[in-house]
Amino acid sequence: MKKNNLNLTTTIALVAFLCFFGCSNAFVNGQLQLKYLSLSDPVKQNQTCERHIEVLYKRNSSTEFTPDDRVILDKLGLNRKDRIKVFHEYLNFYGDTCVSNKYFSNIYGRSQNRAEMVKKNIRYPVEVEALYSITTMLFKGSVIVSPVLINQQTGKVCNFNRNDIDIVYKIYKEWLKKMEKRNFSKLSWPLENGNYKWLGEDAVDDIESLLKESL
């Protein structure tokens, strides 16, 4: 009995260590530098750590419904310069491999894709949540893609593949530099003509037709 209790204690301690130190580069190196974003408190689920990115804003009460990031940022009335800063802040979560427990409403992703994620139990880490959040803010209205990255060469979901995520982050960083040079006056699709796509991206012939004209 004592041995079982010791094993349980050791497991809990290991999960706590991974939650706070092992799964997030952004938590250690980036959070103190962030003005608009932060990490939620970690939640233990089945011996894993789960958390998500939150937009910092003053709530009217502790029971107030928390809207999604796009709505909050619109309420903050940020100018273009500050919105670009938010994009940079999202990229600070690169390396955070904790499973995200972010809830996205039904305006995010097509219903069949949301059903597929549930059926196949497809999860995504905080670092993919960050890229997806940037992507959602490019759309004029409903977002047709879901937070699932696919390597088109292999046809496999790559949300937790280190090599693939490294490449996609590099693509987004280069895209951000490109957009900044033209002051985000004409938005382009970050993964255009590349080896990676978001689940649901191929539902339309011209995904850029669904994007805002400017940030």
Image (spheres, rainbow, N blue to C red):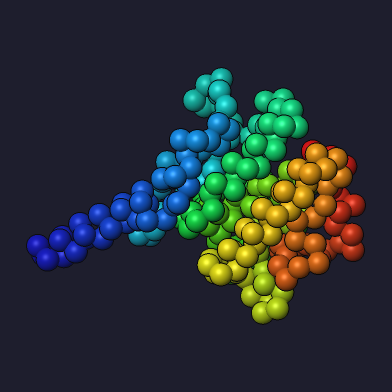
Please identify the quarter of the rendering in which residue 105 is found. Answer: top right
Q: Residue furthest left?
A: 2
* Residue at point 55%, 61% (across, down): 123
Q: Residue furthest top?
A: 60
Q: How many labels does the image show?
A: 0
Residue 92: % across, % down: 55, 46
Q: Is residue 118 above or below residue 37?
A: below
* Residue 9 placement, left or right of 148: left
* Residue 82 placement, left or right of 214: left
* Residue at point 32%, 56% (across, down): 15
* Residue 191 placement, left or right of 115: right
* Residue at point 83%, 43% (across, down): 182
Q: What is the quadrant of the N terminus in the image?
A: bottom left
Q: Is residue 85 above or below residue 107?
A: above
Residue 35: % across, % down: 55, 31
Viewer can see residue 212: no
Residue 188: % across, % down: 82, 52
* Residue at point 67%, 69% (across, down): 150
Return the residue nearer the eye: 32 or 208. Answer: 32
Return the residue nearer the eye: 76 or 163. Answer: 163
Q: What is the quadrant of the C terminus in the image?
A: top right
Viewer can see residue 194: yes
